[in-house]
Image: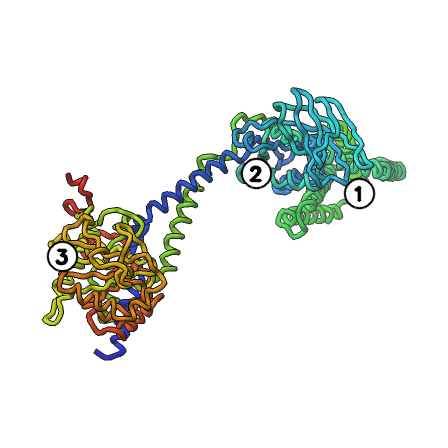
Amino acid sequence: MPENEDKKVVGQSSQNADTITLLEAIQILWGKKFTLFFFVLFGAVIGVCIAYWLRPQYTSDVLLQIDVKGSKAGKAMGEMGALLDAASPADAEIELIKSRMVLSYVVDAERMCFNATPIGVVDRFTHKEGRMDLDSLYIPEIARGEKWKAQVIGTDSYEVLDPEERVILKGRVGDMYRAPYAGDTLNIHVSKMLAKPGQMFVLSQSDDLTTIESLKKKLSVKEKGKQTGIIEASYSHRYPDKAASILNSIAKTYLRQNVEMKSAEAAKTLEFLEKQLPGVKAKLDSAEKVLADYRFRIGSVDVTGETQAHLQKEADLQKQLLQLEQQRQAATRLFKEEHPNVQTIVKQQNKLKAELSKLKKNAERMPLTQQEVLRLKEDVAVNNEVYTNMLNNIQQLRVVRAGEVGNVRIVDFARMSMRPSKPKKVNIIICSVAASFMIGVLLVFLMRMIQNGVRSSSEIERETNTSVLAKIPQHHDSGVSRKSHRKFVVQECPNDTVSESIRSVLTAIDFSYTENSDHQIIMITGIVPGVGKSFVSTNLAAAYGLVGKKVLYIDADMRKATCRFTNVGLTDVLLGKKTFEEAVFKTCGVDGLELLESGKYKSVAFEILRGGRFKNLVEELRPHYDKIIIDTPPFSLVADTYMICPLADLTLIVLHYGRHSMEAIQEALQNLNRYSDKPKAFIMNHCEHRSGYGYGYYGQYGYYGKSKKDKS
């Protein structure tokens, strides 16, 4: 195969090894189930704390109706009502409700600038906080930004503490109190108090603008449906009666200001009409006088039926033109001249004007005397119509101004809600648990990405041309560790997947015998600490002992020297302080297995190994044992392993699953090859357990995966 094709296949294999399928992701998460359970439990605790820490909020709502088609009073006023009762869109009314013009009155009426906030961790968690309502509070400006407190000392008495925790005054509910402070005066008036003695409150005074902005953010105003004219306003507060009271104040204030606005408009229009009335009356009188004078001069004129009908029709057209002009003026208050509604009215006016012009041309065919009488009567009729309409409108406007009529009414007043709307405890706990679980999942995969080492045995074999004898699953027990007296896993749990993996190592070693070597001396090492080399070496030695071999386990990691079973070890033998027979431990619980521990001397490990004493000891022991297993230090940190490597018939390098990069594995193998050309192999430890067959992998087949106790 060409070289570029080889690289392509290798690249594809590496990419496939880094790809995680859905099943593998589930298996990874299942392997970290205890970690995820901790996150879920932690999230549940946080959710419960948040749910109970948040103060209950009670929501009230009020319903308003905006007459978008004009009020009944406006319709009763006729043409003039169209001018005064032009309705605004619902969005405009919503903005008016949330304006400072309305909310400033509410903030002042409800005393929202004065606050007494309860404090106390236990009372807040148990929702047993007290309540203190203030009608008046003035904190001296020099200390307004500091923390003032009020403490309950009786059912209706309290005391005020300054920022230095000094008592400034003592008072009772319902009375106004004043106390001098720093050249100024502290004023306070408590209108209501429901609290137990000893409970504390933080007193605060905010400015009007800040309070209005806060109320505006919490106030929700929206139209129900589309173009219904029904507006719903809702507000949440930690006290239900306060929420209802604030909403009702908003509704009443808005209603009052709407009426005042309509009355103000009526008053302005009335003033204008009253100023114009004398001029209109003068025109009417002048027209009537001209007609009377003309008749007196020429005598009586017989007006025919045609002339009378013509006169009546012209008067009707003039009246319709006047009505359309009033409608156009009302429309231009809301829309521009280019709007379709305005243009429709203009077209109707032009049509009537054309008819009126045609009617006047027809009048030119009448006798001159009748034409003149007709013209004069038209003037009198038009002026009389204008004067009569103006009198009616003035009377109607006087009724509006006196009757206080608006286009808003309150449908439903706000009422107290006995059930809190917030917080929704179940939702908070569920969200907290879900968020904690997701954080746990992200952390698991993040740690996997950080430990982006090799996980594929086939990739190691392909890149290093060295066999991987077994993949040992993660196990909760570490076997016979340096600081414990536990039994070997292969002895305590012979049917465990870890034990099967250890036996697969033994089988692989036995089937790799050659004519020149039977792998009698096996050295087990690791690249870095924490890979589990001691766990593998002790259990492999025990496995050989359980199959009838005579085995010697030598702990050559003298820099971490520890004696579990005896007070002497390898360092004592090499220094000549003890004989081998005095240092070896033969009763470790496995027939045929003997242990030679490292000893207690740490400072002379490298010097001892550089000499020939360890080599001579190994050669002396070789005829007496079937297998000699040597546990050595991590060779990336110390050089002790390089001194022992030439003595071993087989070197086993223990790798931590997913922790080592391919470059680190190749470099480690090259370093060992400099000191020994004897066979070497890898063992992958701490592998993630997956169902199915493979190196050291077993599912729940038969009794595999069960302890001896379960089997029995």
- Give the quarter of the image for residue 677: bottom left
Say which label, 1 or 2, has the lower sequence index.
Answer: 2
Does residue 441 sit above or below 509 in this rendering?
above
Few, some or many residues within 10 Å of mark 3 (<14, 14–19, 20+): some
Q: Nearer the viewer, residue 284 or 258?
A: 258
Q: Quadrant of residue 413?
A: top right
Furthest toward the bottom, the residue is: 2
Reading the chain from its start, which is encountered first: label 2 or label 3? Answer: 2
**Circle 1 is placed at which residue position?**
375
In the rendered image, the residue lying farthest to the top is: 155
From the viewer's perspective, is residue 587 above or below residue 7?
above
Residue 407, position in %: x, y? 66, 33
Of residues 484 and 673, the one nearer the viewer is: 484
User: Looking at the image, which residue is at 34% across and 64% down?
Assistant: 604
Identify which amino acid the numbered label 2 is placed on: Glu
In front of the other: label 2 or label 3?
3
Residue 170 against residue 460 in the figure, above or below = above
Name the residue that disc number 2 marks. Answer: 223
Task: State the CA–CA distance, disc 1 to disc 2.
Answer: 55 Å
Spot occupied by residue 125 in the image (x, y as percentages of width and height) = 52, 32
